[in-house]
Image: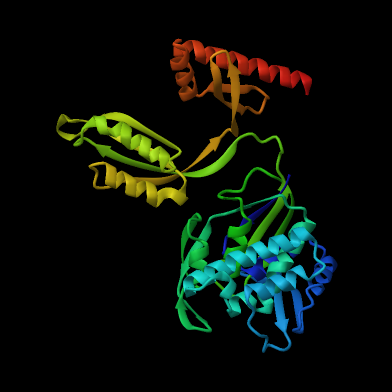
């Protein structure tokens, strides 16, 4: 599998992304031919120049507009430009996905719909060249999956058509909401709206670089000078297709409870699972003054954090919740329905790297069949497990 890793050491912008991918070995002639098919009415030049930042070399991609009085464009205008070009469908889809996300963020901060956005940030020629150019190069490298490092945070102010605004720019802040970040203490724009849109639209996961057989490395330089080298580094390489463990970011929420009736807690657990928690469990504790209590632990994805947090505070007597991000590795799994003499039973199936299969009949299905047939749950469980194992063995022999 061809994989791209975005190492946002000093952030990411559209020109940095394009410069880094070109530096990694993209075919510049194919890039320029693809951009020509956009048939932009404005006259522009895409300059690719090797420069240095704090002693580190890289490529600087700069879009020079010869008639800078270009009109603002709506998302509809951009969509028409891209779909009317001769670019391959996958390039068009990638570019449109990035622009749609960017327009949605701009629309939200300005209180309008994405289709009604008429901002320089969305319609400018440089954004078009950077985003479409990035999509062209990604297709050339046949990138199948993109990972990204946590995005750096920063502060300060910048000028735009609306005057002076704080950094991160409102659209950037909207785009990186829910994405892992890290503090830098740097004053200046490290992540632009275009860069944030590229990263958050295309990256399947945010975190450390996965194990790769690296084939290409590129450095894309930014315009500003910071105390650290201002570049985006990209790694392109091969990731094994037989990878069975899936890495993901998870939040762990915990609270200790010793002052509410314990019979309420199972209902709280059920509500948390129904609200989107991945796992919920209770651990007995001896609290201060020797009181018996419980630690409520919830695992959830970042996007449901607020919902889960609110539910814990509402449904329990606690006044606070501890929270920490963690990483976990999970086996891909699927649930299949197995026909047994007692009725249909759902079975969870996961596969290890060596081909060994793990089977687990779902308790609720076994319990329901046991009640209907007036049989022990263990009997139904073992029958479902054996039938599922036989079915999989037969399938493997025939394949």
Q: Which residue shows up at 58% across the image and 16% down it?
A: 340
Left/right placement of residue 328 relative to residue 315 reads right
Name the colour scheme.
rainbow
Q: Quadrant of the C terminus?
A: top right
In the displayed structure, 129 sits above or below 71; it is above
Q: Is residue 24 visible?
A: no
Q: Is residue 342 visible?
A: yes
Residue 284 location in percent, x, y?
A: 28, 28
Left/right placement of residue 217 relative to residue 188 reads right
Q: Quadrant of the N terminus?
A: top right
Closer to the camera in the image, 147 or 81: 81
Left/right placement of residue 242 relative to residue 118 reads right
Q: Which residue shows up at 69% across the image and 17% down it?
A: 393
Residue 117 location in percent, x, y?
A: 57, 75
Q: Which residue shows up at 27% across the image and 38% down it?
A: 256
Figure disc tally: 0
Residue at the extreme left of the image, as rendered: 289
In the displayed structure, 124 sits above or below 392; it is below
In the displayed structure, 353 sits above or below 73; it is above
Closer to the camera in the image, 347 or 167: 347
Closer to the camera in the image, 350 or 45: 350
Residue 123 location in percent, x, y?
A: 64, 77
Residue 183 location in percent, x, y?
A: 45, 60
């Amino acid at each position: 599998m061809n994989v791209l890793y975005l190492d946002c050491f000093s952030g990411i912008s559209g020109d940095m992304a394009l410069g880094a991918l070109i530096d990694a070995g993209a075919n510049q002639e194919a890039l320029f031919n693809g951009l020509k098919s956009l048939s932009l009415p404005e006259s522009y030049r895409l300059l690719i120049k090797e420069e240095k930042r704090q002693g580190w070399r890289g490529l600087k991609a700069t879009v020079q507009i010869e008639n800078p009085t270009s009109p603002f464009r709506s998302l509809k205008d951009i969509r028409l430009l891209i779909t009317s070009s001769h670019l391959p469908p996958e390039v068009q889809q990638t570019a449109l996905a990035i622009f749609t996300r960017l327009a949605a963020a701009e629309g939200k901060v300005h209180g309008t719909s994405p289709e009604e956005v008429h901002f320089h940030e969305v319609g400018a020629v440089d954004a078009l060249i950077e985003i479409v150019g990035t999509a062209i190069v990604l297709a050339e490298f046949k990138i199948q999956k993109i990972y990204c490092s946590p995005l750096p945070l920063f502060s300060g102010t910048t000028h735009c058509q609306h005057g002076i605004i704080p950094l991160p720019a409102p659209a950037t802040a909207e785009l990186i909401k829910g994405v892992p970040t890290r503090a830098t203490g740097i004053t200046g724009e490290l992540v632009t709206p275009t860069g944030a849109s590229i990263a958050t639209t295309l990256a399947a996961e945010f975190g450390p670089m996965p194990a790769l057989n690296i084939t290409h490395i590129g450095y894309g330089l930014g315009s500003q000078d910071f105390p650290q080298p201002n570049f985006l580094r990209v790694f392109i390489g091969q990731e094994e297709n037989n990878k069975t463990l899936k890495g993901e970011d998870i939040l762990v929420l915990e609270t200790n409870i010793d002052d509410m009736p314990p019979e309420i807690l199972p209902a709280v657990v059920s509500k948390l699972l129904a609200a989107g928690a991945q796992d919920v469990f209770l651990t007995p504790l001896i609290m201060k003054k020797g009181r018996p209590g419980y630690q409520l632990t919830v695992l959830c994805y970042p996007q449901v954090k607020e919902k889960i947090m609110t539910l814990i505070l509402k449904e329990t007597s606690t006044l606070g919740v501890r929270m920490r991000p963690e990483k976990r590795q999970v086996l891909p799994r699927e649930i299949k329905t197995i026909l047994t003499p007692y009725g249909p039973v759902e079975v969870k199936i996961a596969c290890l790297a060596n081909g060994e299969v793990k089977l687990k009949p779902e308790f609720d299905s076994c319990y329901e069949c046991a009640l209907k047939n007036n049989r022990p749950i263990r009997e139904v469980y073992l029958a479902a497990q054996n039938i599922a194992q036989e079915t999989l063995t037969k399938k493997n022999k025939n394949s």
